[in-house]
Amino acid sequence: MTTVSIDNNKILIDGTPTYKNRSYEGKPIEGLLFNVRAVQATFDDENPATSPLWAYPDTGNWDPERNTAEFLEALPSWRDHGVLGFTINFQGGGGRYIPEVYDTYINSGFTPQGEIKPAYADRIKRVIARADELNMVVIVGFFYWKQFNKFENTQAVWTALENGFQFLKSLRNHNILIELANETDILHKYIQLPMSEFAIDQSHRLIEYFKNRYPEFLISTSYVPVHLQSMNFQVSDEYIRASDFLMPHGNHLKPDQLEAHIKFLQNHPEFIKCPKPIIINEDSTGTPNLEVCWKNYASWGYYDQGYNGEPRIHDIWVPDQGEHQRETDVALLSGFQTPPVNWKINTPRKKAFFTRVAEITGYNK
C-alpha cells in the first residue's frame, strides 16, 4: 500500500523522498511532486440539457465510465515520465465557461444535501486504488465554486465535508493529500452561502478543524496569488502555519511573478520556522513556469484546458486564435479539462510537459 508523508519541505512516498538522490542542473529534485490537474477524471453531468455537450465524437454520447476507464489506462504512461501525482475533485472543475453551460451543468460527487453519490464515489475509489497500485499520490479536492453553490444550505456543506472525509477514511488508502477547496479566494468571493471559513484570511480555521478531526490526513487548500495581489492581500501567517503543504496556483503568472511568490513563501517567518512542501497543482501548459518552480524547489502542476470551441481563457501560454473548432476525432482531443478528454500524451503541449519532466526527474532512461 502506497503511503504519502511529509518531511519538512519534502514529499515522501513509502517513507522515501520522491526522486531519491536526484538533482538536475545542480538543483535538488528529491522530494518534489510533479503533477497534473486531472479533476475531470471522475466527471459526469446530471443535467440532461448540458450532458450531450460532452459527447465523444466517435459515439455521439457522453460516457462517464469510459472517461474514468481511459484515465486509468493512461496513468502508467504518466508515471513512466516521472509524474507521481495528480489532482481530482469531488466537484471537478470548469469544463466550458459560457454561462449557459457553466451556470447549469451538474458535476458533483455530493447531492444538494451533502450526501455522497454512490456512482461518483465509486469512480473516485477506483482512481485512488489505481494510483495506489502505481505508487502515485492523489490530491483530492472537495469543492469547486460553481458546484458549491448548488448546496441547499450551510449545513449541507458541513455534511458534505464530513461525508467526504469519512468516505476517504473508509478506503484505507494512504496515498491521499486533501485540498479542501479549489481556490478559496474565488470560492469565498462568489459563494452564496454565509461561509466565512472559506475566506482566504479565515481558511486556516477550516484546515485546523479537520486536521484535528482527521489527523491521518495531510490537509491544505489552494489560492491564486494574482487574485490576492489585486485585493492587496497576502496569505496569512495562520494559513502558512496551519497548512501541511502550501498550494498557490500559478494561473496568469509569468515566470518572474511566480518565482517572486515562491520566494515570498520560502522567506516568510512562519515558513522558515517550519518548512513545508510548496505544491502548485494548477498553473497552465507553460513549461517556462515549470522551469521556475523546480529551480526554486517548488512542485508544479500541469493544467491543460484544451480547445472547446471558445477563445483562450486561462492559459497565457496558448496563443489566442479566436474561435477554435471543436475536435471531431478522439485521437485529436486536446487538453485534460474539457470533456470529452483524451487522457493520452497526444498533443505537442502534453508531450512538451511530460518529456521535460522525464528529463528533470531522470525517468527518461
Image (cartoon, rainbow, N blue to C red):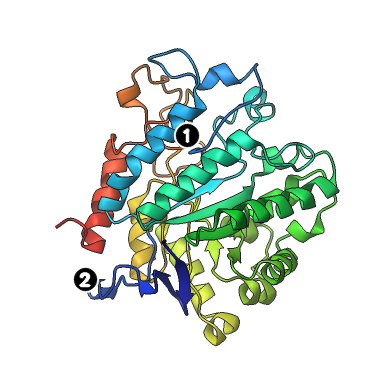
- For label 1, the crowd category at 10 Å Cα-Cα, with few meaning under 14, some 14 to 19 and many 20 or more, is some
Q: Horizontal and vertical percent for residue 12?
A: 40, 71
Give coordinates of residue 317: x percent, y percent. Answer: 39, 44
41, 308: nearer the viewer: 41
Q: Is residue 177 above or below residue 80?
A: below
The image quarter in which residue 68 lies: top left
Q: Secondary structure beneath disc 1?
A: loop
Report whether 302 appears left or right of 50: left
Name the residue carrying label 1: 312
Q: Is residue 52 left or right of residue 24?
A: right
Q: What residue sits 49% from the left and 15% below the top?
A: 61
Q: Which mark is residue 219?
A: none
The answer to which of 85 and 223 lies nearer the viewer is 85
Which residue is at a point 60% across and 55% down the rendered structure image? 170
Residue that numbered label 2 is attached to: 25
Q: Quadrant of residue 165?
A: bottom right
Say which of marks 2 and 1 sits in front.
Answer: 2
Q: Is residue 239 visible?
A: yes
- Asked if 77 appears above or below 327 in the picture, the reply is below
Q: Are marks 2 and 1 in contact (CB under 8 Å)?
A: no
Question: CA gap, disc 2 to disc 1?
Answer: 34 Å
Amino acid found under the numbered disc labelled 2: Glu
